[in-house]
Image (cartoon, grey):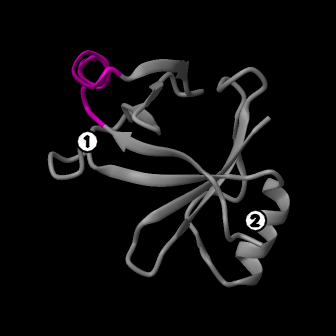
């Protein structure tokens, strides 16, 4: 069942990731808990503060001024990514990723995730740290 999941993180896309990360650290006191690169070489930072974890990243294709720094997705923790994916498919959810995707360079052993789109267009990510 997909209900009662803990929040994993809030994803923010930006065109100035280093400067934005510094702002969250210097102004709000967030602490960097992870710094990674995607297979495409994009910088990704995970910051924790005020009970939240933010994933702040800079895509290789710049985001529009209207979208930069806005919430890109909300991620929920998954203990069984395969079962969650199966349930979303069975429920008829709009999957916005290429199935279950994996980034082996995140955290110690990688991460597996997929995203669905809500009726209002918001993306919800289910992620399982391996």
Q: Secondary structure at mark 1?
A: loop
Say if 29 sits above or below 79 in the image.
Answer: above
Residue closer to the observer: 18 or 5: 5
Q: Residue placed at 55% from the left, 64% from the top?
A: 96
Q: Secondary structure at mark 2?
A: helix
Q: Rate crowding at label 2 as few (under 14), some (14 to 19) or many (20 or more) other CA atoms within 10 Å.
A: many
Instruction: Point out the image quarter for the N terminus.
Output: bottom right
In the figure, is residue 70 to the left or right of 126? Answer: left
Give the x, y percent position of residue 108.
Answer: 74, 20
Q: Pinpoint residue 32: horizontal percent, then vertical percent.
A: 46, 18
Give the left or right position of residue 101, taking residue 8 as reference.
Answer: right
Image spot of residue 46 (x, y percent): 49, 27
Q: Which residues are magenta?
A: 14-29
72 to the left or right of 123:
left
Name the residue: 32% across, 20% down.
Answer: 29
Residue in front for this viewpoint, 130 or 42: 130
The vertical placement of 96 against 13, above or below, is: below
Report the Cα–Cα distance between label 2 and label 1.
28 Å
Q: Position of residue 75 (x, y in %)?
A: 55, 52
> What residue is pinned by disc 2?
85
For the stretch drawn in magenta, the main secondary structure is helix
In the rendered view, does 38 fall on the left or right side of 24?
A: right
Identify the image quadrant of residue 109: top right
Does 130 appear in magenta?
no
Residue drawn at x 39%, y 72% is 121
Q: Residues within 10 Å of mark 1 (few under 14, many from 20)?
A: many
Q: Which mark is residue 69?
A: 1
Examine the rendered structure and indicate whether residue 104 appears above or below residue 112: above
């Amino acid at each position: 069942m997909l209900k009662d999941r803990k929040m994993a993180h809030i994803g923010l896309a930006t065109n100035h990731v280093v400067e934005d990360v510094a702002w969250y650290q210097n102004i709000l006191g967030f602490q960097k808990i992870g710094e990674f690169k995607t297979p495409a070489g994009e910088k990704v930072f995970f910051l924790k503060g005020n009970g939240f974890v933010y994933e702040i990243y800079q895509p290789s294709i710049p985001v529009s001024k209207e979208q930069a720094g806005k919430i890109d997705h909300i991620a929920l923790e998954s203990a069984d990514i395969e079962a969650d994916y199966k349930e979303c498919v069975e429920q008829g959810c709009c999957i916005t990723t290429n199935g279950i995707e994996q980034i082996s360079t995140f955290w110690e052993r990688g991460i597996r995730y997929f995203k669905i789109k809500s009726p209002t267009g918001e993306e919800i990510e289910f992620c399982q740290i391996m």
